[in-house]
Image (cartoon, rainbow, N blue to C red):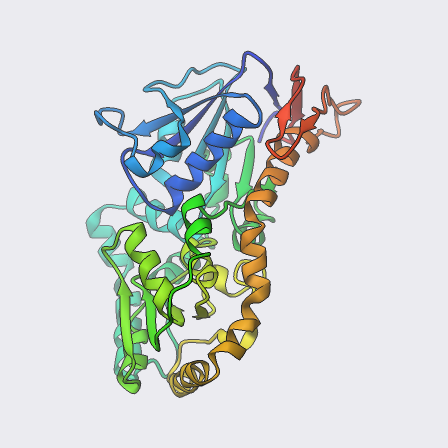
Amino acid sequence: MSKAKKLIINNKTKIFILAPANTFTGGPECLHQLAFHLKKVFKAKTYMVYLPTEVEKPVHKNFLKYKTNYSKFVEDNNNNILILPEQFCYLKYALRYKKINKVIWWLSVDNFFGFKFREDNSKFLRSLIKIPYNFISLFNRITKFYFGILTYHDYLKYIYNFTKYHKQKEVDQAHLHLMQSQYAFDYFKDKFKNIKKLYDYQSDMVLKKCKEKVKKKNEICYSHKSNKFINEIKKVLKFKFIALKNMSANQVINIFKKTKIYLDFGYHPGKDKMPREAVLFNNCVITNLKGSAKNIHDIPIPKKFKFNENNENIKKISKLIELIFKNYKKEIKLYKRYQKKTLLERQNFKKQLSEIFINVIFCPSKLPSPMVMLSPTFVGDTGIISALTVISLSLLP
């Protein structure tokens, strides 16, 4: 950034959060959770702005519980804050606002490159760029994944690593970057100066229903985002496999209740909700080593439950599945750490919010002193602010 700017939150400040209209997925729920807490805990004037703005009923029925206000317009002035997800169409949309303080919440890494690739290139150019990837994919299928798998998103990340995408105006317009996963934090920490963590949490419905007891079966469910490698596993085993596809939230929960194993061989663009839900319903989670699944923070399970996707590991995964069914009570105990961490997410979310908007100050070295104007007092578990005057965050250039 060319010039240091201040992000000020006071009684006049309005916070606008961009989100897709009438869409129920993990990303939009994160944005509604954020709006809910900014309004309830910080007493901030917070508004969702749904795109496209022409949608008549933009609030999805599953998000009505958050009781968020929404606006069709963003008030572009220096007092206000605009929070937007990392999808490239939202970054381009935000360029029209010149005065407002902008915050990008990176809910994923890989999806950013996927959307950017579509926005940057014509259909013809995309098809040309994908030619090497198509040959590699064909080779992987012919060799039955003997050499592993190169995902489409890995391919795009590799291409964009040769560019200065983080210096483009769509990304560089942000005053602050928030990371939804350790994966995103590690990936971008050398790209951005103003960077903080903000992890989401599981919904109240999940936390309530995971306490219900249902008899488990020797069945396996798996993410619909899982690649074709999972088909090779299915060929070896005779157990029932259930694809979590085209299901409502309640239907997914009902599957989690009865299965013992959850497989996720997707590309893990961020700290996905699905593995966390699965483990809360006492599913043994088995993943690949893509994206956020590679580190021990986003999916904190023992190494023996994470695999590279190659032909050699198909038998190992199959034997592990048989072992879990044989010794389920013993194996599920190895997931206690993951379960405990997931149950503490809401508490940690509140803590991270207070650090971002209250206790964390970015002060340029050129300024004589930091500018902290307030440290609010929290009362009880709801975190009610007893006094709110000015919070000033001086951001690095």
Where 80 falls versus 17 (above or below)?
above
Tell me if residue 9 can be seen. Answer: yes
On-image quarter of the C terminus: top right
**Residue drawn 57% across and 46% down?**
191
Residue 384 appears left or right of 324: right
Q: Residue at x 54, y 38 (%)?
A: 177
> How far across and how far down the image is residue 321, in percent?
41, 81
Q: Is residue 122 above or below residue 259?
A: above
Describe residue 326's horizontal placement relative to residue 372 as left or right: left
- Taking depth in this image into account, of 356 and 6 the one nearest to the observer is 356
Residue furthest right in the image = 368
From the top left corner, tell me how far across and down residue 49 is, in percent: 36, 26
Q: Is residue 301 visible?
A: no
Residue 320, image x, y percentages: 45, 83
Q: Report the number of numbered marks.
A: 0
The image quarter containing residue 265 is: bottom left
